[in-house]
Image (cartoon, helix red, strand yellow):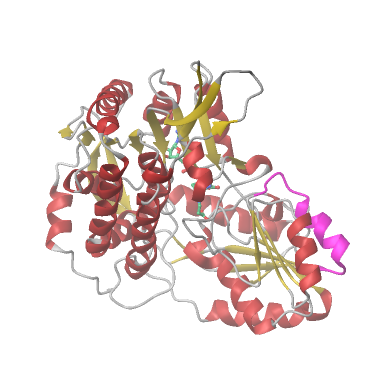
Amino acid sequence: MTDLIPLLPDVEAFLEGPLSLRIGGGKIDTAGSIEVTDPSFGTPLCTVAKAGAAEVDLAVAAAAEAYEGPWSSMTPDERSQRIWRLAELVDQRAEIFGQLDALDNGKPFAVARDVDAAYSARHLRYFAGWPSKIEGATIPVSVPDRFNYTRIEPVGVCGLIAPWNYPLLMAVWKIAPALAAGNAIVMKPAEQTPLSALYLADLALEAGLPEGVLNVIPGIGTEAGAALAGHPGVGKIGFTGSTATGRRIVEASMGNLKKVSLELGGKAANIVFADADLEKAVAGAFWALFGNNGQSCTAGARLYVQRPVYDKVVEGLAELAAGVSVGPGMAEAAHDLGPVISERQMQTVTGYIDSGLSEGAECIAGGGRVGAAGYFVAPTILIGVTDTMRAAREEIFGPVLCVLPFDDEAEVIARANDTDYGLAAGLWTQDVTRARVLAERLKAGTIWINCWGETDAASPFGGMKQSGYGREMGADAIALYSQTKSVWVV
Ligand SMILES: NC(=O)C1=CN([C@@H]2O[C@H](COP(=O)(O)OP(=O)(O)OC[C@H]3O[C@@H](n4cnc5c(N)ncnc54)[C@H](O)[C@@H]3O)[C@@H](O)[C@H]2O)C=CC1
Ligand code: BAL
Protein backbone atom coordinates (compact mmCIF):
# COMPACT_ATOMS: atom_id res chain seq x y z
CA MET A 1 0.00 0.00 0.00
CA THR A 2 1.51 3.37 -1.05
CA ASP A 3 1.58 6.09 1.61
CA LEU A 4 -0.17 9.20 0.30
CA ILE A 5 0.32 12.86 1.15
CA PRO A 6 -2.64 13.92 3.34
CA LEU A 7 -5.05 16.30 1.64
CA LEU A 8 -4.80 19.90 2.78
CA PRO A 9 -7.98 21.03 4.61
CA ASP A 10 -8.57 23.59 1.82
CA VAL A 11 -8.36 20.85 -0.81
CA GLU A 12 -10.73 18.62 1.16
CA ALA A 13 -13.22 21.46 1.49
CA PHE A 14 -12.89 22.34 -2.19
CA LEU A 15 -13.47 18.74 -3.29
CA GLU A 16 -16.52 18.49 -1.06
CA GLY A 17 -17.92 21.10 -3.43
CA PRO A 18 -20.25 21.69 -4.90
CA LEU A 19 -17.89 21.81 -7.86
CA SER A 20 -20.20 24.07 -9.81
CA LEU A 21 -19.59 26.17 -12.91
CA ARG A 22 -18.08 29.55 -12.13
CA ILE A 23 -20.13 32.09 -14.09
CA GLY A 24 -20.52 35.81 -13.44
CA GLY A 25 -18.93 35.52 -9.99
CA GLY A 26 -21.49 32.90 -8.93
CA LYS A 27 -21.64 29.12 -8.73
CA ILE A 28 -24.04 27.49 -11.16
CA ASP A 29 -25.17 23.89 -10.80
CA THR A 30 -26.16 21.83 -13.80
CA ALA A 31 -28.44 18.85 -14.45
CA GLY A 32 -25.60 16.84 -15.99
CA SER A 33 -22.25 16.14 -14.36
CA ILE A 34 -18.76 14.89 -15.14
CA GLU A 35 -17.30 12.00 -13.13
CA VAL A 36 -13.62 12.87 -12.69
CA THR A 37 -11.28 9.89 -12.33
CA ASP A 38 -8.08 9.67 -10.30
CA PRO A 39 -5.69 8.21 -12.91
CA SER A 40 -3.27 7.06 -10.22
CA PHE A 41 -5.83 4.47 -9.07
CA GLY A 42 -8.44 4.38 -11.83
CA THR A 43 -11.08 5.23 -9.22
CA PRO A 44 -13.71 8.01 -9.01
CA LEU A 45 -12.29 11.23 -7.59
CA CYS A 46 -15.17 13.72 -7.64
CA THR A 47 -18.19 14.92 -9.57
CA VAL A 48 -18.10 18.25 -11.34
CA ALA A 49 -20.89 20.27 -12.96
CA LYS A 50 -21.06 19.88 -16.73
CA ALA A 51 -21.72 22.83 -19.00
CA GLY A 52 -23.83 22.39 -22.12
CA ALA A 53 -24.81 24.89 -24.78
CA ALA A 54 -27.19 26.74 -22.40
CA GLU A 55 -24.43 27.28 -19.83
CA VAL A 56 -22.04 28.41 -22.57
CA ASP A 57 -24.65 31.06 -23.48
CA LEU A 58 -24.84 32.14 -19.83
CA ALA A 59 -21.07 32.34 -19.47
CA VAL A 60 -20.62 34.30 -22.71
CA ALA A 61 -23.34 36.74 -21.60
CA ALA A 62 -21.65 37.17 -18.20
CA ALA A 63 -18.29 37.76 -19.86
CA ALA A 64 -19.78 40.27 -22.31
CA GLU A 65 -21.40 42.19 -19.44
CA ALA A 66 -18.16 42.29 -17.46
CA TYR A 67 -16.22 43.34 -20.55
CA GLU A 68 -18.57 46.16 -21.44
CA GLY A 69 -18.84 47.21 -17.80
CA PRO A 70 -16.27 47.28 -15.03
CA TRP A 71 -13.36 45.58 -16.78
CA SER A 72 -12.94 47.96 -19.72
CA SER A 73 -13.56 50.99 -17.54
CA MET A 74 -10.54 50.15 -15.37
CA THR A 75 -7.24 51.87 -16.07
CA PRO A 76 -4.33 49.73 -17.31
CA ASP A 77 -2.73 50.12 -13.90
CA GLU A 78 -5.84 48.82 -12.14
CA ARG A 79 -5.91 45.78 -14.43
CA SER A 80 -2.18 45.19 -13.86
CA GLN A 81 -2.58 45.23 -10.11
CA ARG A 82 -5.33 42.61 -10.22
CA ILE A 83 -3.39 40.27 -12.50
CA TRP A 84 -0.33 40.70 -10.26
CA ARG A 85 -2.44 39.93 -7.17
CA LEU A 86 -3.70 36.78 -8.88
CA ALA A 87 -0.06 35.76 -9.46
CA GLU A 88 0.68 36.28 -5.78
CA LEU A 89 -2.33 34.18 -4.79
CA VAL A 90 -1.24 31.36 -7.10
CA ASP A 91 2.19 31.45 -5.46
CA GLN A 92 0.67 31.47 -1.96
CA ARG A 93 -1.67 28.56 -2.81
CA ALA A 94 0.89 26.57 -4.80
CA GLU A 95 0.44 23.60 -2.44
CA ILE A 96 -3.29 23.58 -3.13
CA PHE A 97 -2.80 23.82 -6.87
CA GLY A 98 -0.15 21.11 -6.62
CA GLN A 99 -2.58 18.76 -4.89
CA LEU A 100 -5.43 19.49 -7.31
CA ASP A 101 -3.29 18.83 -10.40
CA ALA A 102 -1.70 15.77 -8.78
CA LEU A 103 -5.14 14.35 -8.05
CA ASP A 104 -6.90 14.68 -11.38
CA ASN A 105 -3.87 14.64 -13.69
CA GLY A 106 -1.69 12.19 -11.73
CA LYS A 107 1.58 14.10 -12.09
CA PRO A 108 3.80 14.04 -8.99
CA PHE A 109 2.64 16.58 -6.40
CA ALA A 110 6.11 18.16 -6.12
CA VAL A 111 6.20 18.72 -9.89
CA ALA A 112 2.69 20.15 -9.95
CA ARG A 113 3.58 22.55 -7.14
CA ASP A 114 7.16 23.50 -8.08
CA VAL A 115 6.81 23.54 -11.85
CA ASP A 116 3.19 23.94 -12.95
CA ALA A 117 2.02 26.28 -10.17
CA ALA A 118 5.31 28.20 -9.95
CA TYR A 119 5.46 28.79 -13.72
CA SER A 120 1.79 29.79 -13.72
CA ALA A 121 2.48 32.50 -11.13
CA ARG A 122 5.50 33.66 -13.11
CA HIS A 123 3.43 33.79 -16.27
CA LEU A 124 0.76 35.91 -14.62
CA ARG A 125 3.43 38.25 -13.22
CA TYR A 126 4.99 38.75 -16.64
CA PHE A 127 1.64 39.59 -18.24
CA ALA A 128 0.64 41.79 -15.29
CA GLY A 129 3.22 44.23 -16.64
CA TRP A 130 1.63 44.50 -20.07
CA PRO A 131 -1.60 46.52 -19.75
CA SER A 132 0.26 49.83 -19.52
CA LYS A 133 2.55 48.93 -22.43
CA ILE A 134 0.06 48.05 -25.15
CA GLU A 135 0.68 50.97 -27.47
CA GLY A 136 -0.70 52.05 -30.80
CA ALA A 137 1.33 54.17 -33.22
CA THR A 138 1.14 57.37 -35.19
CA ILE A 139 1.35 56.53 -38.88
CA PRO A 140 3.18 58.78 -41.37
CA VAL A 141 0.42 58.65 -44.02
CA SER A 142 0.87 60.39 -47.38
CA VAL A 143 -2.55 62.03 -47.33
CA PRO A 144 -2.26 65.77 -46.78
CA ASP A 145 -3.82 67.32 -43.69
CA ARG A 146 -4.78 64.04 -42.13
CA PHE A 147 -3.63 62.58 -38.84
CA ASN A 148 -3.70 58.78 -38.58
CA TYR A 149 -3.07 56.70 -35.50
CA THR A 150 -3.78 53.17 -34.31
CA ARG A 151 -5.42 51.88 -31.17
CA ILE A 152 -4.74 48.36 -29.93
CA GLU A 153 -8.02 47.13 -28.52
CA PRO A 154 -9.16 43.92 -26.84
CA VAL A 155 -11.20 41.42 -28.84
CA GLY A 156 -13.96 41.33 -26.21
CA VAL A 157 -15.00 37.86 -25.11
CA CYS A 158 -12.39 35.12 -25.55
CA GLY A 159 -13.18 31.40 -25.38
CA LEU A 160 -10.18 29.51 -24.05
CA ILE A 161 -10.04 25.72 -24.33
CA ALA A 162 -7.34 23.94 -22.35
CA PRO A 163 -5.96 20.38 -22.39
CA TRP A 164 -5.27 18.02 -19.50
CA ASN A 165 -1.49 17.61 -19.68
CA TYR A 166 -0.66 20.78 -17.70
CA PRO A 167 -4.11 21.65 -16.32
CA LEU A 168 -3.26 24.88 -14.51
CA LEU A 169 -0.33 26.01 -16.62
CA MET A 170 -2.03 25.66 -20.01
CA ALA A 171 -5.07 27.52 -18.67
CA VAL A 172 -2.83 30.32 -17.40
CA TRP A 173 -0.83 30.49 -20.65
CA LYS A 174 -4.06 31.71 -22.23
CA ILE A 175 -5.78 33.52 -19.36
CA ALA A 176 -2.83 35.81 -18.53
CA PRO A 177 -2.36 37.43 -21.96
CA ALA A 178 -6.11 37.54 -22.60
CA LEU A 179 -6.63 39.47 -19.35
CA ALA A 180 -3.62 41.70 -19.92
CA ALA A 181 -5.00 42.69 -23.33
CA GLY A 182 -8.25 43.64 -21.60
CA ASN A 183 -10.57 40.77 -22.56
CA ALA A 184 -13.17 38.87 -20.55
CA ILE A 185 -12.90 35.10 -20.61
CA VAL A 186 -14.88 31.90 -20.81
CA MET A 187 -12.45 29.08 -20.02
CA LYS A 188 -13.29 25.45 -20.66
CA PRO A 189 -10.80 23.14 -18.97
CA ALA A 190 -10.38 19.56 -20.16
CA GLU A 191 -13.06 17.25 -18.78
CA GLN A 192 -10.38 15.03 -17.21
CA THR A 193 -8.76 17.89 -15.23
CA PRO A 194 -11.19 20.66 -14.28
CA LEU A 195 -10.12 21.23 -10.66
CA SER A 196 -7.29 23.76 -10.76
CA ALA A 197 -9.10 26.00 -13.27
CA LEU A 198 -12.19 26.07 -11.04
CA TYR A 199 -10.05 26.97 -8.05
CA LEU A 200 -8.30 29.68 -10.10
CA ALA A 201 -11.69 31.24 -10.87
CA ASP A 202 -12.30 31.58 -7.13
CA LEU A 203 -8.88 33.19 -6.64
CA ALA A 204 -9.56 35.61 -9.49
CA LEU A 205 -12.46 37.07 -7.49
CA GLU A 206 -10.23 37.26 -4.43
CA ALA A 207 -7.64 39.09 -6.53
CA GLY A 208 -10.23 41.73 -7.41
CA LEU A 209 -11.12 40.76 -10.96
CA PRO A 210 -14.69 41.93 -11.52
CA GLU A 211 -17.33 39.21 -11.55
CA GLY A 212 -17.71 37.71 -15.00
CA VAL A 213 -14.20 38.54 -16.21
CA LEU A 214 -13.03 34.95 -15.70
CA ASN A 215 -15.76 32.33 -16.11
CA VAL A 216 -14.77 28.67 -15.86
CA ILE A 217 -17.09 26.03 -17.28
CA PRO A 218 -16.00 22.39 -17.19
CA GLY A 219 -17.67 20.43 -19.97
CA ILE A 220 -17.21 17.81 -22.63
CA GLY A 221 -15.26 18.93 -25.68
CA THR A 222 -17.83 17.96 -28.27
CA GLU A 223 -20.57 19.71 -26.24
CA ALA A 224 -19.36 22.77 -24.29
CA GLY A 225 -16.12 23.10 -26.29
CA ALA A 226 -17.92 22.94 -29.61
CA ALA A 227 -20.61 25.37 -28.41
CA LEU A 228 -17.94 27.84 -27.31
CA ALA A 229 -16.03 27.53 -30.58
CA GLY A 230 -19.22 28.18 -32.55
CA HIS A 231 -20.65 30.91 -30.31
CA PRO A 232 -21.45 34.20 -32.12
CA GLY A 233 -20.69 36.20 -28.96
CA VAL A 234 -17.10 34.93 -28.76
CA GLY A 235 -14.54 36.93 -30.74
CA LYS A 236 -11.54 34.70 -30.26
CA ILE A 237 -10.73 31.09 -29.43
CA GLY A 238 -7.39 30.13 -27.90
CA PHE A 239 -6.95 26.37 -28.04
CA THR A 240 -4.39 23.77 -27.01
CA GLY A 241 -5.00 20.13 -27.86
CA SER A 242 -4.99 17.65 -30.71
CA THR A 243 -4.64 18.59 -34.35
CA ALA A 244 -7.92 16.79 -35.14
CA THR A 245 -9.83 18.91 -32.62
CA GLY A 246 -8.02 22.03 -33.83
CA ARG A 247 -9.51 21.43 -37.29
CA ARG A 248 -13.00 21.10 -35.78
CA ILE A 249 -12.53 24.37 -33.93
CA VAL A 250 -11.57 26.18 -37.12
CA GLU A 251 -14.72 24.81 -38.79
CA ALA A 252 -16.92 25.80 -35.84
CA SER A 253 -15.39 29.29 -35.73
CA MET A 254 -16.36 30.06 -39.31
CA GLY A 255 -19.91 31.20 -38.44
CA ASN A 256 -18.75 34.57 -37.09
CA LEU A 257 -15.19 34.35 -38.45
CA LYS A 258 -13.72 34.57 -34.97
CA LYS A 259 -9.97 34.83 -34.46
CA VAL A 260 -8.40 31.46 -33.64
CA SER A 261 -4.99 30.46 -32.30
CA LEU A 262 -4.05 26.81 -32.17
CA GLU A 263 -1.31 25.05 -30.23
CA LEU A 264 -1.58 21.48 -31.46
CA GLY A 265 0.26 18.20 -31.68
CA GLY A 266 3.92 17.47 -32.28
CA LYS A 267 6.45 14.76 -33.09
CA ALA A 268 9.63 16.63 -32.30
CA ALA A 269 12.99 15.52 -33.67
CA ASN A 270 15.87 15.64 -31.23
CA ILE A 271 19.29 15.20 -32.86
CA VAL A 272 22.45 14.05 -31.09
CA PHE A 273 25.62 14.65 -33.13
CA ALA A 274 28.76 12.64 -32.44
CA ASP A 275 30.60 15.75 -31.17
CA ALA A 276 28.00 16.46 -28.44
CA ASP A 277 28.73 16.45 -24.73
CA LEU A 278 27.27 12.95 -24.46
CA GLU A 279 26.56 12.91 -20.75
CA LYS A 280 24.40 16.04 -21.07
CA ALA A 281 22.90 14.92 -24.38
CA VAL A 282 21.80 11.52 -23.06
CA ALA A 283 20.15 12.94 -19.94
CA GLY A 284 18.69 15.82 -21.95
CA ALA A 285 17.29 13.52 -24.63
CA PHE A 286 15.87 11.16 -22.02
CA TRP A 287 13.92 13.85 -20.17
CA ALA A 288 13.01 15.58 -23.44
CA LEU A 289 10.65 12.67 -23.95
CA PHE A 290 9.94 11.28 -20.49
CA GLY A 291 9.35 14.66 -18.79
CA ASN A 292 5.62 14.90 -17.92
CA ASN A 293 5.45 11.22 -18.88
CA GLY A 294 5.71 11.99 -22.59
CA GLN A 295 2.42 13.89 -22.37
CA SER A 296 3.80 17.07 -23.89
CA CYS A 297 3.27 18.37 -27.37
CA THR A 298 6.97 19.29 -27.35
CA ALA A 299 8.12 15.81 -26.31
CA GLY A 300 11.38 14.88 -28.07
CA ALA A 301 9.77 11.76 -29.51
CA ARG A 302 12.10 11.03 -32.44
CA LEU A 303 15.65 10.82 -31.17
CA TYR A 304 18.15 10.81 -34.07
CA VAL A 305 21.63 9.72 -32.97
CA GLN A 306 24.71 9.93 -35.20
CA ARG A 307 25.98 6.44 -35.89
CA PRO A 308 29.44 6.62 -34.18
CA VAL A 309 27.80 7.36 -30.79
CA TYR A 310 24.55 5.45 -31.31
CA ASP A 311 25.41 2.41 -29.14
CA LYS A 312 26.76 4.57 -26.32
CA VAL A 313 23.67 6.78 -26.32
CA VAL A 314 21.30 3.80 -26.36
CA GLU A 315 23.19 2.24 -23.47
CA GLY A 316 22.95 5.50 -21.47
CA LEU A 317 19.24 5.83 -22.16
CA ALA A 318 18.58 2.27 -20.99
CA GLU A 319 20.49 2.93 -17.76
CA LEU A 320 18.42 6.04 -17.08
CA ALA A 321 15.17 4.19 -17.80
CA ALA A 322 16.12 1.51 -15.28
CA GLY A 323 16.42 4.19 -12.56
CA VAL A 324 13.07 5.90 -13.15
CA SER A 325 10.44 5.58 -10.44
CA VAL A 326 6.70 5.75 -11.07
CA GLY A 327 3.94 6.26 -8.54
CA PRO A 328 0.62 7.91 -7.73
CA GLY A 329 0.54 11.68 -8.01
CA MET A 330 0.05 12.03 -4.26
CA ALA A 331 2.60 9.39 -3.19
CA GLU A 332 4.63 10.45 -0.15
CA ALA A 333 7.78 8.92 -1.58
CA ALA A 334 9.55 11.06 -4.14
CA HIS A 335 9.08 9.67 -7.64
CA ASP A 336 9.71 10.75 -11.20
CA LEU A 337 6.54 9.97 -13.12
CA GLY A 338 2.84 9.41 -12.54
CA PRO A 339 0.27 7.54 -14.60
CA VAL A 340 -0.93 8.59 -18.05
CA ILE A 341 -4.18 10.51 -17.98
CA SER A 342 -6.79 7.82 -18.69
CA GLU A 343 -7.45 4.22 -19.50
CA ARG A 344 -8.03 5.26 -23.12
CA GLN A 345 -4.66 7.03 -23.24
CA MET A 346 -2.98 3.98 -21.68
CA GLN A 347 -4.47 1.79 -24.40
CA THR A 348 -3.40 4.26 -27.10
CA VAL A 349 0.16 4.35 -25.77
CA THR A 350 0.56 0.60 -25.32
CA GLY A 351 -1.05 0.16 -28.76
CA TYR A 352 1.78 2.23 -30.26
CA ILE A 353 4.37 0.11 -28.44
CA ASP A 354 2.77 -3.05 -29.84
CA SER A 355 2.58 -1.56 -33.33
CA GLY A 356 6.29 -0.67 -33.20
CA LEU A 357 7.20 -4.19 -32.09
CA SER A 358 5.02 -5.78 -34.76
CA GLU A 359 6.70 -3.60 -37.42
CA GLY A 360 10.15 -4.83 -36.32
CA ALA A 361 11.29 -2.45 -33.56
CA GLU A 362 12.97 -3.77 -30.43
CA CYS A 363 12.18 -2.69 -26.89
CA ILE A 364 15.21 -2.05 -24.63
CA ALA A 365 13.26 -0.62 -21.69
CA GLY A 366 9.67 -0.81 -20.50
CA GLY A 367 7.23 -2.28 -23.00
CA GLY A 368 3.76 -1.96 -21.49
CA ARG A 369 1.51 -1.33 -18.54
CA VAL A 370 2.84 -1.37 -14.97
CA GLY A 371 0.58 -2.89 -12.28
CA ALA A 372 -3.14 -3.50 -12.50
CA ALA A 373 -4.49 -0.40 -10.74
CA GLY A 374 -4.07 3.07 -12.20
CA TYR A 375 -2.95 3.92 -15.70
CA PHE A 376 0.80 3.40 -15.49
CA VAL A 377 2.95 2.71 -18.53
CA ALA A 378 6.64 1.83 -18.06
CA PRO A 379 9.10 4.28 -19.64
CA THR A 380 9.66 2.56 -22.96
CA ILE A 381 12.55 2.87 -25.41
CA LEU A 382 12.25 1.46 -28.93
CA ILE A 383 15.30 0.90 -31.14
CA GLY A 384 15.44 -0.58 -34.64
CA VAL A 385 12.78 1.99 -35.51
CA THR A 386 12.42 3.29 -39.07
CA ASP A 387 10.98 6.63 -40.13
CA THR A 388 7.95 4.98 -41.71
CA MET A 389 6.72 3.10 -38.64
CA ARG A 390 3.55 4.46 -37.03
CA ALA A 391 5.35 4.85 -33.70
CA ALA A 392 7.87 7.15 -35.41
CA ARG A 393 5.34 9.18 -37.40
CA GLU A 394 2.30 9.69 -35.17
CA GLU A 395 2.01 11.59 -31.90
CA ILE A 396 1.94 8.99 -29.10
CA PHE A 397 1.67 11.43 -26.18
CA GLY A 398 3.03 8.95 -23.68
CA PRO A 399 6.31 7.53 -22.35
CA VAL A 400 7.64 5.97 -25.58
CA LEU A 401 10.95 7.10 -27.07
CA CYS A 402 11.92 6.06 -30.62
CA VAL A 403 15.68 6.05 -31.26
CA LEU A 404 16.92 6.20 -34.87
CA PRO A 405 20.51 6.27 -36.18
CA PHE A 406 21.70 8.74 -38.86
CA ASP A 407 24.90 9.37 -40.80
CA ASP A 408 25.17 12.98 -41.91
CA GLU A 409 23.78 16.46 -41.40
CA ALA A 410 21.86 16.84 -44.67
CA GLU A 411 20.22 13.46 -44.20
CA VAL A 412 19.09 14.17 -40.64
CA ILE A 413 17.70 17.61 -41.51
CA ALA A 414 15.56 16.04 -44.25
CA ARG A 415 14.38 13.25 -41.96
CA ALA A 416 13.66 15.60 -39.04
CA ASN A 417 11.55 17.82 -41.31
CA ASP A 418 9.68 14.90 -42.87
CA THR A 419 6.63 15.26 -40.62
CA ASP A 420 3.30 17.07 -40.73
CA TYR A 421 4.15 18.64 -37.38
CA GLY A 422 6.43 21.57 -36.58
CA LEU A 423 6.19 22.54 -32.93
CA ALA A 424 9.71 21.96 -31.60
CA ALA A 425 13.05 20.42 -32.53
CA GLY A 426 16.44 20.25 -30.88
CA LEU A 427 20.06 19.33 -31.36
CA TRP A 428 23.10 18.49 -29.32
CA THR A 429 26.47 19.55 -30.74
CA GLN A 430 29.55 21.58 -29.84
CA ASP A 431 29.83 22.95 -33.38
CA VAL A 432 28.41 26.49 -33.32
CA THR A 433 28.14 26.78 -37.10
CA ARG A 434 26.22 23.54 -37.36
CA ALA A 435 23.91 24.70 -34.55
CA ARG A 436 23.21 27.95 -36.36
CA VAL A 437 22.54 26.21 -39.69
CA LEU A 438 20.18 23.67 -38.14
CA ALA A 439 18.34 26.34 -36.16
CA GLU A 440 17.61 27.92 -39.55
CA ARG A 441 16.76 24.76 -41.48
CA LEU A 442 14.66 22.80 -38.98
CA LYS A 443 11.00 23.61 -39.57
CA ALA A 444 9.68 24.10 -36.06
CA GLY A 445 8.42 26.98 -33.93
CA THR A 446 10.98 26.38 -31.17
CA ILE A 447 14.56 25.09 -31.52
CA TRP A 448 16.51 23.96 -28.48
CA ILE A 449 20.31 23.77 -28.77
CA ASN A 450 22.06 21.71 -26.08
CA CYS A 451 18.91 21.87 -23.94
CA TRP A 452 15.25 20.88 -24.11
CA GLY A 453 11.92 22.16 -22.91
CA GLU A 454 12.98 25.68 -21.93
CA THR A 455 10.09 28.14 -22.08
CA ASP A 456 9.63 31.61 -20.67
CA ALA A 457 6.62 33.90 -20.49
CA ALA A 458 8.59 36.46 -22.54
CA SER A 459 9.54 34.14 -25.41
CA PRO A 460 7.06 33.27 -28.18
CA PHE A 461 5.88 29.67 -28.33
CA GLY A 462 3.86 27.92 -31.02
CA GLY A 463 3.90 25.70 -34.04
CA MET A 464 4.51 25.58 -37.76
CA LYS A 465 2.67 23.30 -40.20
CA GLN A 466 -0.03 21.17 -38.51
CA SER A 467 1.21 22.05 -35.03
CA GLY A 468 -0.97 25.13 -35.28
CA TYR A 469 -0.71 28.87 -35.65
CA GLY A 470 -0.31 31.90 -33.44
CA ARG A 471 2.36 32.35 -30.79
CA GLU A 472 1.59 32.21 -27.10
CA MET A 473 3.77 34.16 -24.67
CA GLY A 474 5.69 37.39 -25.08
CA ALA A 475 4.46 40.31 -27.16
CA ASP A 476 3.02 37.87 -29.72
CA ALA A 477 0.49 36.65 -27.17
CA ILE A 478 -0.78 40.17 -26.60
CA ALA A 479 -1.31 40.45 -30.36
CA LEU A 480 -3.29 37.18 -30.31
CA TYR A 481 -5.81 38.69 -27.93
CA SER A 482 -5.94 42.19 -29.45
CA GLN A 483 -7.09 43.91 -32.62
CA THR A 484 -5.80 47.04 -34.28
CA LYS A 485 -8.01 49.99 -35.11
CA SER A 486 -6.88 52.72 -37.50
CA VAL A 487 -8.20 56.21 -36.69
CA TRP A 488 -8.21 59.13 -39.16
CA VAL A 489 -8.55 62.67 -37.89
CA VAL A 490 -9.07 65.85 -39.85
N1 LIG B 1 -0.93 20.01 -27.82
C1 LIG B 1 -1.09 19.51 -26.62
O1 LIG B 1 -0.52 19.98 -25.64
C2 LIG B 1 -2.06 18.37 -26.44
C3 LIG B 1 -2.22 17.41 -27.40
N2 LIG B 1 -3.10 16.39 -27.20
C4 LIG B 1 -3.18 15.33 -28.22
O2 LIG B 1 -4.54 14.96 -28.41
C5 LIG B 1 -4.69 13.56 -28.20
C6 LIG B 1 -6.08 13.28 -27.71
O3 LIG B 1 -6.31 13.91 -26.46
P1 LIG B 1 -7.71 14.64 -26.20
O4 LIG B 1 -7.82 14.98 -24.78
O5 LIG B 1 -8.80 13.83 -26.80
O6 LIG B 1 -7.48 16.00 -27.05
P2 LIG B 1 -8.51 17.07 -27.50
O7 LIG B 1 -7.81 17.98 -28.45
O8 LIG B 1 -9.77 16.45 -28.01
O9 LIG B 1 -8.86 17.86 -26.14
C7 LIG B 1 -8.28 19.06 -25.74
C8 LIG B 1 -9.36 20.05 -25.31
O10 LIG B 1 -10.26 20.25 -26.40
C9 LIG B 1 -11.60 20.01 -25.99
N3 LIG B 1 -12.37 19.55 -27.15
C10 LIG B 1 -12.50 18.28 -27.62
N4 LIG B 1 -13.30 18.27 -28.71
C11 LIG B 1 -13.67 19.55 -28.93
C12 LIG B 1 -14.47 20.20 -29.93
N5 LIG B 1 -15.07 19.52 -30.91
N6 LIG B 1 -14.63 21.54 -29.88
C13 LIG B 1 -14.02 22.24 -28.89
N7 LIG B 1 -13.25 21.70 -27.92
C14 LIG B 1 -13.08 20.37 -27.95
C15 LIG B 1 -11.46 19.00 -24.86
O11 LIG B 1 -12.61 18.98 -24.05
C16 LIG B 1 -10.23 19.54 -24.16
O12 LIG B 1 -10.60 20.62 -23.34
C17 LIG B 1 -3.57 13.20 -27.25
O13 LIG B 1 -3.25 11.85 -27.30
C18 LIG B 1 -2.47 14.06 -27.78
O14 LIG B 1 -1.90 13.46 -28.90
C19 LIG B 1 -3.85 16.32 -26.07
C20 LIG B 1 -3.74 17.25 -25.07
C21 LIG B 1 -2.78 18.34 -25.17
N1 BAL C 1 1.33 22.51 -24.69
C1 BAL C 1 2.50 23.23 -24.32
C2 BAL C 1 3.41 22.53 -23.40
C3 BAL C 1 3.74 21.16 -23.88
O1 BAL C 1 2.81 20.34 -24.00
O2 BAL C 1 4.90 20.88 -24.14
Q: Does residue 416 belong to the magenta stretch?
A: yes
Let me know if residue 438 is in the magenta part. Answer: no
Q: Residue at x 32, y 57 (%)?
A: 101
428 or 67: which is nearer to us?
67
- Residue 29 location, quadrant: top left
Residue 356 horizontal side relative to residue 6, left or right:
right
The reply, left or right, for residue 231 in relation to residue 445 is left
In the rendered view, does 480 fall on the left or right side of 232?
right
Write the residue at 54% across / 19% down.
254
Residue range in magenta is: 405-422
In the image, residue 230 lies at what x, y percent? 45, 21
Identify the residue at the far front of this view: 145
Query: Percent x, y for residue 139?
Result: 58, 30
- Residue 337 in view in this figure: yes
Q: Position of residue 482 (x, y in %)?
A: 46, 33
Say which quadrant the N terminus sits in: bottom left
In this orientation, which residue lies closer to the viewer: 486 or 208?
486
Q: Is residue 209 above or below residue 385?
A: above
Q: Position of residue 450 (x, y in %)?
A: 65, 72
The residue depicted at 20 percent of the width and 36 percent of the height is 210
Number of marks: 0
Query: Residue 12, located in which quarter of the rendered image?
Result: bottom left
- Along the viewing direction, whichever of 236 and 373 lies nearer the viewer: 236
Where 64 sits versus 20, above or below? above
